[in-house]
Amino acid sequence: MIVNKNLKHLRLHVELTQKQFAEKLGLKQSVIGAYEEERATPPLAVLLDVCQRYKISMDVLTRKDLSQLPEKEWKSSASEKEVLAITVDASGKENVEFVTQKASAGYLAGYQDPEFIADLPKINFPALPKNKTIRAFEIQGDSMLPVQPGSILFGEYVERVEEIKNSKPYVLITTQEGIVFKRVFRFDDDAEKLLLVSDNRQYTPYAIATTDVLEIWSVRGYYSSKLPEAESPSSLTDQLALQVLQLQRQLQSKSK
């Protein structure tokens, strides 16, 4: 239970009593005592809060012994990208925050701010995967047709760029492009860039630097109040339809 030992070491390092540490995390002193005595395992929401407050990498907090590391080492290894701001309901279950089109610009500045995230609307959708961190995004534009503009995408949080699977749809939070919804390709021979491709081929694929990516959300589904537009039939389809119609008429005439 290295994470329990690390929480106690961190509390002593910042010179806080159990009561003071609990107050900062919005918990009861008895809960902190249970963690330190290894009678309970701290949930993800608590660990994320600790990482954000004390600038510690989640990997270091849960895998390495802080007491054996110099402070500059475990603090310098912290990456802001690893700390995801989330909210939970009264039962401790993670909420599904909804980033509307109006909130998309503010999200770039507030995606790591727990207060900003807490103010976002919440969505309850029973078909979503359980025990996963899910966020909803309202999309703009027609670059990913047949997914219609205004559709709500449900994305599962992806911690590292290396976990991206080629050709799968993702919502990326980027410094240069803002919030984008594309199919993403990552190539081993160029680990510093990602290729973004639209399903609507009228849009040209383009590359972005991995350093520009703030968050990655794997799209698991979407909701739309609009049905996809019917595709215009091709001339070949028209010809086939006419041939089928003529064949049906011939069969009907023979049966009379």
Image: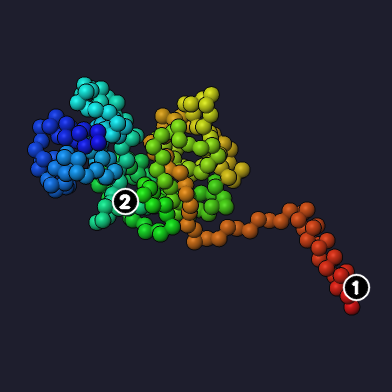
Give the image location of residue 42, x and y in percent: 24, 43
Residue hosting label 1:
254
For the image shown, how many numbered marks are present on the structure?
2
Reading the image, the residue beneath label 2 is 94
Say left or right for 251 vs 63: right
Considering depth in this image, is 236 or 42 the residue closer to the camera?
42
Determine whether label 2 and label 1 are within 8 Å by CB.
no
Residue 223 drawn above or below residue 187:
below
Residue 244 coordinates in the image, percent (x, y)? 81, 63
Name the amino acid, label 2. Glu
The answer to which of marks 2 and 1 sits earlier in the sequence is 2
Q: Residue at x 51, y 43 (%)?
A: 169
Report the side of 27 relative to 127 (left or right): left
Residue type marked 1: Lys
Quadrant housing residue 22: top left
Query: Which SS class for mark 1?
Result: helix
Structural crowding at the residue carrying mark 2, measured as other residues with C-alpha within 10 Å and reported as few (<14), some (14–19) or many (≥20)? some
Name the residue located 77 percent from the left edge and 58 percent from the top edge: 238
Q: Quadrant of residue 107?
A: top left
Q: Secondary structure at mark 2?
A: loop
Indicate the quadrant containing the N terminus: top left, top right, bottom left or bottom right.
Answer: top left
Residue at left offset 78%, top offset 61%: 241
Residue 50 screen position, x and y as percent: 23, 38
Residue 185 is left or right of residue 69, and the answer is: right
Whole-angstrom CA distance, mark 2 to mark 1, is: 67 Å
Residue 247 drawn at (x, y percent)? 85, 65
Residue 232, above or below 56: below
- Relative to 117, say whether 164 is above or below: above
Q: Is residue 53 visible?
A: no
Visible residue check, residue 90: yes
